[in-house]
Amino acid sequence: MEKAILVVEGMSCGHCSNAVKNLIEEVDGVKSTSIDLTSKQAEVEFDASSTSMKTIIDSINSSEIYKATQK
């Protein structure tokens, strides 16, 4: 298992943080996700043999509302 912290721009409310969490958790290999709306960060635990950080970031960015980068 690997852990990573992402900075996610565009989150401004609880609905936004739930939407980002759902986008992350749709990716196969993601084990857990924790969103901190105040710091605009997402902590992601994932199986690196099943997915990559790029795939997770691409999933978030595909919404065209949120912009994720690795911290």
Image (cartoon, rainbow, N blue to C red):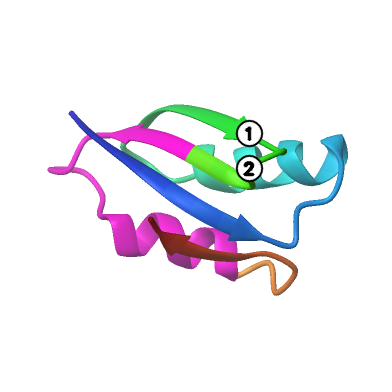
Answer with left or right where residue 70 lies relative to residue 23: left
Can you tell which quarter of the image residue 69 is in? bottom left
Q: Which residues are magenta?
A: 43-61
12 displayed left or right of 67: right
Instruction: Residue at 87% x, 42% y: name it.
Output: 13
Residue 36: give x, y in percent of width and height. Answer: 63, 33
User: What kind of residue is marked 1?
Assistant: Asp
Instruction: Indicate yes or no whether the magenta region holds residue 53.
Output: yes
Q: Nearer the viewer, mark 1 or mark 2?
A: 2
**Quadrant of the image occupied by residue 30:** top left
Q: Which mark is residue 36?
A: 1
Q: Say if 71 sits above or below 32 in the image.
A: below
Secondary element at image label 2: loop
Q: Residue at x 49, y 30 (%)?
A: 33
Q: Amino acid at mark 2?
A: Ser
Q: Position of residue 35 (x, y in %)?
A: 60, 33
Which residue is drawn at the image coordinates 71% and 38% (left, top)? Answer: 37
